[in-house]
Each structure stands twice: as structure tokens, then as C-alpha cells.
Amino acid sequence: MRTLLITMISVSILLSNAGWTHAAPDKTWIASLEKGDRFENDGFSYATLPTLFAIKTDASGAAALRADLSGNGSDRFIQQKGPFSLYEQAVSVKSASIRALSKASAGDGFAYPAVLNLKTQSLGVLTGKLWLKLKDLSDADAIASDYALSLSFTNTALSTAFYEVPKSASVNLLALRNQLAADPRVETVTLDMVDRIRHPM
């Protein structure tokens, strides 16, 4: 029994060091991170994190073992967040944009902006998707055209249109959010993000 317990503890430590767990980073470390622009989203306050980014992988964390995403060996795996692996980078990225990675083999080839939930102090990822509650749902296609967005679908009951930002162009998601919020056809703007994830006990 004692041997089994020691083996289980050893495996747990190895998995933790490999970055395969969903354990949250230390709160002191999170507090020390450089904070960028602040914004409200879906009832919560957030700040962008210029020294963190995420790649889209799978929930197993296997791709999180890639240690050289930027090509200079400086990226360090932080946490698996749903289908995204969060990394710390040595150089701040001041724009909350989805950007192409220098190594296209990493994830889907793009880096996604990281954010901090200022209430829960949990890390999140902006996915490049958003939904708009519109005053008139018939404006959904025109808004897609005006802002170079891809319209995914609409929900008539909620008067809501769901969009995705094309990855072929670098779009600052916060600047886009502010432009849409000022559009008289739009009631509310919500940026899709991976933030509050419930894990099985």
C-alpha cells in the first residue's frame, strides 16, 4: 500500500511538472504580471496580459510540451485552459490581437491574447469569436461586411448574431469591441473567451 502511494505521488509530480494538469498558477505570480488594457465583458472586469499568449491545442495538454513556439526558446508553458495552452513570453505584446506564430506547426499556427479576470484572478483566453445583441437582426449581414467579420449564425429569440474574426488579418479585439459598442445598430458586445472552467472533482 505504501509503495502504491509513493508511486501515485511520483506520477502526480511528474505530470504537474510536464504541464499536463489544470492547476492554477500561483496567485503571487499572477499578481506580479504586467497588466495591459482593462475592459468589461459579460459582467466581469478583465485586463489584458502582454507577456502571456495561448495556442489552440486539445485538453490533454500534449502540445503544451512544445518549448520553442517563438523560435528563440524563451516561451514557458503556464497552464492548460480548456482547448488552449497558455505560455509566458519574454517580450510584451501590446496588442490584443490574434497573430501568426513564427512556427506554424504550433497548435493551429496562431497566438491568442491572454487576459486576467480581475475578480477571480484566473487566466483566460480571447478566442476571436464574439456575439452581438442587435436592435434589428436583419443588420447581421451588413455588420459582418462593415467590420470584415465572418457571420457564424443568428439566434432570432435572443436577437443575437455570432461572429468570428478572420485570422488572415491582425485585428485588435478590444479596438473592434469598442467600435462595435459605438455602432447604433448594436445593443451589447460580448467577446468569447475561455475563462471560468469547471473541472470534474
Image (tube, rainbow, N blue to C red):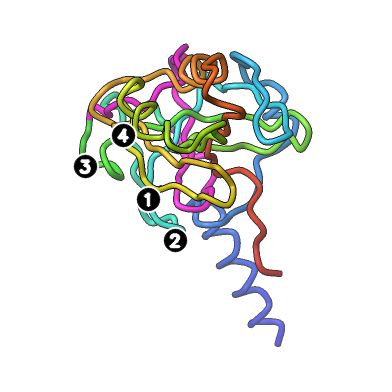
Does residue 194 appear left or right of residue 47 in this picture?
left
Label 1's element? Answer: loop
User: Which residue: 76% across, 38% down?
Assistant: 120
Does residue 36 appear left or right of residue 2 in this picture?
left
* Residue closer to the observer: 169 or 54: 169
Q: Which residues are magenta?
A: 76-102
- Verify CB contact (< 8 Å) between mark 3 and mark 4: no
* Residue closer to the observer: 117 or 32: 117
Residue placed under numbered mark 2 in the picture: 60
Label 2's element? Answer: loop
Mark sitting earlier along the chain (3/4): 3
* Residue closer to the observer: 152 or 191: 152
Q: Position of residue 92 (x, y in %)?
A: 47, 14
Mark sitting earlier along the chain (4/1): 1
Q: Amino acid at mark 4?
A: Phe
- Verify CB contact (< 8 Å) between mark 1 and mark 2: yes
Residue 105 image label: 3
Quadrant of the image for the C terminus? bottom right
Mark sitting earlier along the chain (3/2): 2
C-alpha gap between disc 2 and disc 4: 19 Å
Residue placed under numbered mark 4 in the picture: 110
C-alpha gap between disc 3 and disc 4: 9 Å
Label 3's element? Answer: loop
Q: Amino acid at mark 2?
A: Ser
Label 4's element? Answer: strand
User: Which residue: 50% across, 20% down?
Assistant: 180
Up-down: is 108 above or below 185? below
Crowdedness near tag 4: few (<14), some (14–19) or many (≥20) residues, C-alpha within 10 Å = some
Residue placed under numbered mark 1 in the picture: 57
